[in-house]
Image (spheres, rainbow, N blue to C red):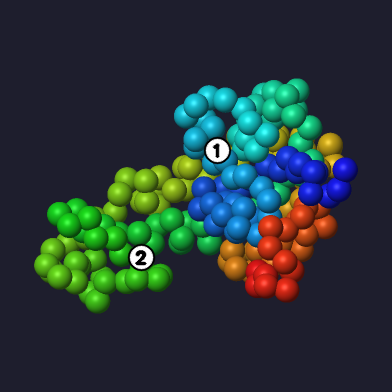
Amino acid sequence: MGASGRLLRAVIMGAPGSGKGTVSSRITKHFELKHLSSGDLLRQNMLQGTGFPRTLPQAEALDRVYQIDTVINLNVPFEVIKQRLTARWIHPASGRVYNIEFNPPKTVGIDDLTGEPLIQREDDKPETVIKRLKAYEAQTEPVLQYYQKKGVLETFSGTETNKIWPHVYSFLQMKVPETIPKASVTP
């Protein structure tokens, strides 16, 4: 059986806002892999080969069903994630979304069109973000240790998805066939 018949069972881990979604979609674009988000998984409450286990019992359950080949851990500093996640402001009446970093309003805290105040969703407030990050860390630390012991954990550290991606890409190139001829790929 050729390399194309080879199935890679990979898990992607990383705190909320660490870039999991972006990395997953790039992986599916460049490689013959299906992406299944943990949110969908948890909603359907089922474990598939690409489940993102958040707790040790989930990781162990996943292992009983599937042989996980590799765990890609996106290690982005909390401070960076906090900035990323708290940068979003919304104009409630219109639903217009501003991002302090990428798409800021002309005047801080004010909607460009109406001059009305912008609000921050509960989820995007610094206190909420810090709580979520701490909860993630406490919950997944044992999962990361578990995969480390099994020898399948690959950690990629950085502050920007665009800088982390080429390393993830090179790592996966050694493991799976690409969907498109190498010549036309720009990571």
Circle 1 Cα neighbour tier, 10 Å, few/some/many (<14 / 14–19 / ≥20)? many
Q: Residue furthest front?
A: 1
- At 40% across and 71% down in the image, what residue appears? 102
- At 32% across and 45% down in the image, what residue appears? 122
Q: The C terminus is located in which quarter?
A: bottom right
Residue 114 visible, this angle: yes
Q: Which residue lies furthest to the bottom in this view?
A: 106
Q: Where is residue 10 in the image (x, y as percent from the top left)?
A: 71, 43
- At 54% across and 41% down in the image, what residue appears? 37
Closer to the camera: disc 2 or disc 1? 1
Q: Is residue 165 left or right of residue 120?
A: right
Q: In this view, does 94 lie to the left or right of 173?
A: left
C-alpha span from label 2 to label 1: 25 Å
Q: Position of residue 175 (x, y in %)?
A: 81, 52
Q: Position of residue 120 (x, y in %)?
A: 29, 54
Pick whichever, 25 or 178, lies toward us.
178
Residue occupied by mark 1: 38
- At 74% across and 29% down in the image, what residue appears? 66
Q: Is residue 184 left or right of residue 161?
A: right
Where disc 2 sits, the SS reads strand
From the viewer's perspective, is residue 40 above or below residue 112?
Answer: above
The kind of residue tagged 2 is Asn
Snapshot quadrant of residue 157: bottom right
Q: Position of residue 53 (x, y in %)?
A: 63, 34
Snapshot quadrant of residue 91: bottom left
Snapshot quadrant of residue 96: bottom left
The mark found on residue 99 in the picture is 2
